[in-house]
Image (cartoon, grey):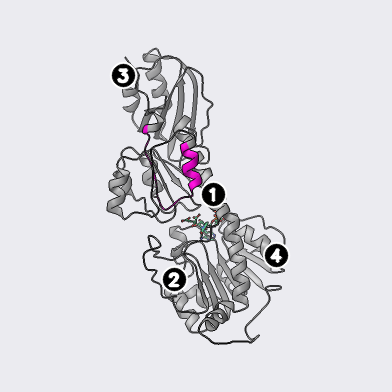
Amino acid sequence: MAPQISLEKGKIRILLLEGVHQSALELLQAQGYANVEYLKTSLPEDQLIEKIADAHFIGIRSRTQLTRKVLENAPKLIGIGCFCIGTNQVDLEAATEFGISVFNAPYSNTRSVAELVIAETILLLRGIPEKNAISHRGGWLKSASGSYEARGKTLGIVGYGAIGSQVSVLAESLGMRVIFYDVITKLPLGNATQIRALEDLLAQADVVSLHVPELESTRDMMGREQIARMKKGAILLNASRGTVVDIEALADALNSGHLAGTAIDVFPVEPRGNQEEFVSPLRGIDKAILTPHIGGSTVEAQENIGMEVAEKLAKYSDNGTTTSSVNFPEVALPTHEGCHRLLHIHRNVPGVLSAINAVFSENNINISAQYLQTNNKIGYVVIDVDADYSDVALEKLKNIDGTLRCRVLF
Ligand SMILES: NC(=O)c1ccc[n+]([C@@H]2O[C@H](COP(=O)([O-])OP(=O)(O)OC[C@H]3O[C@@H](n4cnc5c(N)ncnc54)[C@H](O)[C@@H]3O)[C@@H](O)[C@H]2O)c1
Ligand SMILES: O=C(O)CC[C@@H](O)C(=O)O
């Protein structure tokens, strides 16, 4: 029977949203993916569902919400590229269940965020946002009161991962004392010190900077109580996710004078695009630096992210490589001349590999290479067969208990 093969590259539909960098488009096109739809904004759920119905791959940034409902309406979707670090905007459990591999760019904008945090720390310690606002209104606040050097001040970093640890190194080079809180024991860089309880960090730090992911456990982790525990006159920065800070409590702490300033880059509700109004209780507070989720938005970072994530999508599409996938076991198998390649994604339960192999032996199909990798949820098998596999074999593979998705790549 004539073997089914996957789509020609030109027919693979890729939807890129939120104005991901042109480098992504260029890389995909150079690799033969001509069927790319490029939009500058995210889409509301109904329009997203309509568009995603035909897409094989989707590329997003932090704004597009790929919920279970959206993914249920994406029957052809094979891969998701998050052109950013955070993947909280994707229902990873649903994506895994539907056999959709998710990729991101875990380090490409790390430095950009760290530099912004350091710049804002210096500006806030000097009270520049307020002085700047007053000058714009025709006032003149020439005073040293409430203005401090960064040198010798204590920076408390919450979340000592890629960004938090970069901020730590840069802050120490300014002469700051760095303490950090993380749920995992981390090797401190330089002279930084890990603090075991968040409350202790809050009680010591002149500046607190948040670098945790969006999780249930980080929701409102800087709530009214934690903000009240910060030192009087301290500064709070958040360039992580908007759900981490109780924004009303922060506005109150600034208005009451408990906090001396803040820099917030991420908000519980963010506009979908540049045309939509930004609404926040922090608007109008001079001591607050408000930026439109641009911590990672530098030319360097966006260009690198575009290439990195597009490359990951192309490799997955071309040969099933899942290296650095967020939710899939990592498999990278070289292609074998003259072979067909099948991809089998299944729930990680015992017996699936032997059932797969039984299908090939029963159908007299020789396996020339095979690679299985599992994580706690799923198993991913790449199989190269050196004879024409039959559609019958493919059907049998699809019917193995626990199969999430099975397809022929070439
Ligand atoms: N503003 C922006 O444009 C921008 C850009 C990049 C990343 N981000 C955000 O910054 C976050 C951090 O990025 P990263 O690359 O440093 O991530 P990372 O995964 O390298 O580090 C996160 C750290 O937070 C720690 N952590 C998790 N839960 C915690 C908790 N409850 N309390 C304390 N620590 C906790 C982890 O153990 C880890 O060390 C991302 O998840 C993303 O949401 C924002
Ligand atoms: O570019 C974006 O929209 C998000 C950037 C940042 O929050 C990230 O997670 O990398």
Q: Which residues are magenta?
A: 11-29
Quadrant of residue 42 within the rendered picture? bottom left
Q: Secondary structure at mark 1?
A: helix
Of marks 1 and 2, the one in the foreground: 1
- Inspect the magenta stretch and tell me whether residue 84 lies in it: no
Disc with the residue nearer the chain's start (1 vs 2): 2
Give the residue pinned by disc 2: 246
Disc with the residue nearer the chain's start (1 vs 3): 1
Residue 83 to residue 151: above or below: above
Q: Residue at x 49, y 67 (%)?
A: 291
Q: CA distance from mark 1 to mark 3?
A: 45 Å
Please give the label number shown on residue 303: 1
Crowd around label 4: few <14 · some 14–19 · many ≥20 (10 Å): many
Pointer 1 with pointer 2, Cβ within 8 A: no
Please give the label number shown on residue 148: none
Viewer-proximal residue, 48 or 392?
Answer: 48
Amino acid carrying mark 3 in the image:
Val
Please give the label number shown on residue 172: 4
Viewer-proximal residue, 54 or 364?
Answer: 54
Amino acid carrying mark 1 in the image:
Glu
Q: Secondary structure at mark 2?
A: loop
Q: CA distance from mark 4 to mark 2?
A: 29 Å
Residue 140: horizontal and vertical position, in percent? Answer: 58, 87
Please say whether residue 168 is visible from this viewpoint.
yes
